Amino acid sequence: MASNGACDTMRVFLLAVGCWLNLLIKYYAMESRANHNQVSHCPNKCLSCVQWLPLFKKKKQNSIEKFQNHDIIVYVLGGPGCGKGTQCSKIVEDFGFIHLSAGELLETEVKTGSETGKMIQEFKKEGKLVPSEVVVKLLKQAMQRSGNRKFLIDGFPRNEENRLTAEKMLGIQPTIVLVFDCSEEEMIRRVMQRNQGRVDDNMDTIRKRLKVYKESTLPVIDYYAKKGKARKINAERPVEEVFRSVEAVFSELGLVKRGKTIV
Ligand SMILES: Nc1ncnc2c1ncn2[C@@H]1O[C@H](COP(=O)(O)OP(=O)(O)OP(=O)(O)O)[C@@H](O)[C@H]1O
Ligand SMILES: O=c1ccn([C@@H]2O[C@H](COP(=O)(O)O)[C@@H](O)[C@H]2O)c(=O)[nH]1
């Protein structure tokens, strides 16, 4: 009798474990399909009972990890007027990235006339760097809104504090860092000819921006160079020639032009 009882208990136990494993397998199969965008919700009513299983999982999904795990992030650096924006537009056209220019995001905030916008305008006029939290917050909002997974982050990080704040607030590391290399004389010439009515496109502010670039941004570039992530490109050539070097870097990343194959 006693041994029959033990057998029954064991049978019930094994049955329970079997059911539990079955549920787990179904749940993970479902989650895996959802991650590959094949389904956006529980595909089958009979599986709805397994939806509470995540309660037992370590909390893992938040916006920070989304950026970390799946996205291609290209930082684009170089001195004022070296041609970052020009090349980014071409990259967007050919490789389907979303272009987030830190300078443009700040300018959009200036145009709202908000108190933050007024503060930003003063920094820009002086060629100084806006506090990191302000820029990173704008970048984060833009990244979340975009729904894209390939980001060109243009003109950021400008100093070590920017870099560390992005790591902390966004949890991001760049896949690669494009560095456009150009002489000061050429950058000054390009900025002075730009003629877009920018508050900082004047000789006095350009000199200040160049100083900030040398003192604060070059150390960030050195940091990424040491990590093997910086790709220096000679930007003192015609636009199309510069872009050919950009394309070479992107093919190193395994990305190919749209229209040729799916990226
Ligand atoms: N390779 C190039 N040769 C000549 N002119 C260029 C080249 N690339 C860009 N330009 C011109 O130089 C000016 C500055 O370019 P762009 O705005 O792309 O620079 P940027 O690095 O984004 O500047 P900033 O950091 O000030 O925002 C623009 O008028 C642009 O048309
Ligand atoms: O990360 C950033 C980016 C920009 N700024 C301020 O904006 C101007 C213009 O930036 P561009 O990228 O050259 O358009 C720059 O001189 C800074 O004042 C910033 O503070 N932080």
Image (cartoon, rainbow, N blue to C red):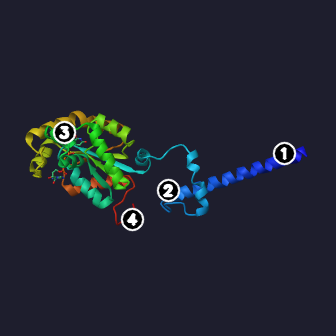
Residue 197 shown left or right of residue 241 in the figure:
left
Q: Which numbered tag is attached to residue 119?
A: 3
Where, by quadrant of the figure, is residue 211 drawn?
top left
Q: Give the residue type at disc 2.
A: Asn
**Which mark's residue is nearer the viewer, 1 or 4?**
1
User: Mark 2 sits on what residue?
Assistant: 35
Residue 52: x and y in percent read 57, 51
Q: Which numbered tag is attached to residue 24?
A: none
**Which mark's residue is nearer the viewer, 3 or 2?**
3
Q: Give the residue type at disc 1.
A: Ala
- Compared to 52, does 58 lie above or below? above
Between 163 and 29, the one nearer to me in the picture: 29
Report the Cα–Cα distance between label 1 and label 2.
Answer: 43 Å
Q: Give the residue type at disc 3.
A: Met
Between 191 and 52, the one nearer to me in the picture: 52
User: Mark 1 sits on what residue?
Assistant: 6
Mark 1 is surrounded, within 10 Å at the Cα level, by few (under 14), some (14 to 19) or many (20 or more) other residues, namely few
Question: In what element is the residue under mark 4?
Answer: loop
Report the Cα–Cα distance between label 1 and label 4.
Answer: 63 Å
Q: Give the residue type at disc 4.
A: Thr
User: Mark 4 sits on what residue?
Assistant: 261
